[in-house]
Image: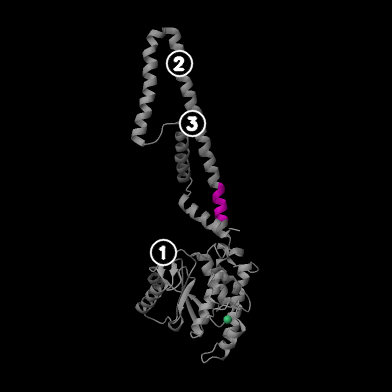
Amino acid sequence: MPIELVAIGDIPTEQFEGVISLANSTQNEFNFIQLQNNEVKAFKALAYKRASVKDLMDRMESTRSELGGYHPFIIALVDTKLDGERFSNLFGSNRAEKGIAVFTIDNVDDIIIPADKIASYMLYYFARFTLSFIVPQHKNHDEPKSCVFDRKIYKQDIVNSMKARAICDECRDKLLSGTVKVSSGQLDALDMLFELSGKLLDGSKTLSIFNNAPAPLDAVSELSVVKSRLDRNAHDFAKRGLWLYFLGIIGVWVTLAIFTYRFGWNIMEPWTYFIGGTLTIGSYVYFAVTQKELSPRTIYEQVIESKKRKNYKEFGLDIERFNQLSKAKSGSQKP
Ligand SMILES: [Zn+2]
């Protein structure tokens, strides 16, 4: 049974892709496939910040029919704030009989589920909606039974059903005996996926991307060593500049003192007046032109910044790329 998945908006790619391959290697009943190329582009356009879940699923349906081809089951993962008819701030929703489902990481990521374990939540909903696709007629129950069919009025209740045997006995009975049934093989596969989602959540299982693919992370560490060396160089450079500035002022002062001693105050007085005045006027002009204060502190900071930029350029350090990488790194390494 092919289940197509698409991430729309700002979704952590590593966890999304990692959890798909984990889901596929765990069981053989369902084939989770990431939508490709043009198909992705069409869906990526639905990157709403906030949407009613009904409208979003309408759009997904029309996007699918415009695409053509065979896409019986599509689950979209979004970062949209989803509003329902009665409730706002939903996890997601589905039109199981049409093979369309959507869920969001908005207000989940780092609020209900730690950001580095969001894969557990993704896996949970992949399995949950897959189950709905098989038995669209099976609805949620209001009574909380730590079951995947709990209505989950309180969002944090979701973690109660992220575990092994996450389907309550009543639901299991119905699923196995209804007119449209879940096969025992499918139910077994889903049980494994829910169990796996619980393990990802409690940390007893981690995505392999966090174990054996540290290449980009190491690159970041290496780059940050280079970067801190270049930054230190910029600070030293600015400090030297500060001392030179200080020595310059002392020099002017000493020169004036010597000239005053040699030529007398009457000759030197206009000089001291104009030199002092020039400095004052100069700082006003500087402020008028640049809207920046001519103080040793701001100059110092500016010198550091421009020297840093020059150093990065000279040593070929792409600082924007570095910031992205280190952001990604700290994101994936949050405790
Ligand atoms: Zn149940």
- Residue 18 appears anywhere in the view: no
195 left or right of 273 in image: right
Residue 86 position within the rendered picture, expressed as x and y whole percent measured from the top left: 44, 73
Q: Name the residue beneath numbered marker 1.
A: 49
The dominant secondary structure in magenta is helix
- The image quadrant of residue 9 is bottom left
Q: CA distance from mark 1 to mark 2?
A: 66 Å
User: Looking at the rendering, in which quadrant would you find the C terminus?
Assistant: bottom right
Q: Which residues are magenta?
A: 218-225
Amino acid type for the residue under numbered disc 2 = Thr
Name the foreground residue: 25 vs 89.
Answer: 89
Amino acid type for the residue under numbered disc 3 = Gly
Q: Cβ(mark 3) to ligand 1 < 8 Å?
A: no
Q: Cβ(mark 2) to ligand 1 < 8 Å?
A: no
Name the foreground residue: 190 vs 258.
Answer: 190
Q: Residue at x 62, y 84 (%)?
A: 169
Up the image or down, 181 lies above or below 86; here it is below
Up the image or down, 46 lies above or below 246; here it is below
Q: Quadrant of ligand 1?
A: bottom right
Looking at the rendered structure, the secondary structure element under dot 1 is loop
As drawn, the label of residue 241 is 3
Confirm whether the magenta stretch covers residue 224: yes
Q: Residue furthest right?
A: 204
Q: Name the residue beneath numbered marker 2.
A: 255
Residue 108 position within the rendered picture, expressed as x and y whole percent measured from the top left: 52, 65
Q: Residues within 10 Å of mark 1 (few under 14, many from 20)?
A: few
Confirm whether the magenta stretch covers residue 212: no
Q: Residue at x 38, y 76 (%)?
A: 58
Residue 129 position within the rendered picture, expressed as x and y whole percent measured from the top left: 50, 78
Amino acid type for the residue under numbered disc 1 = Lys
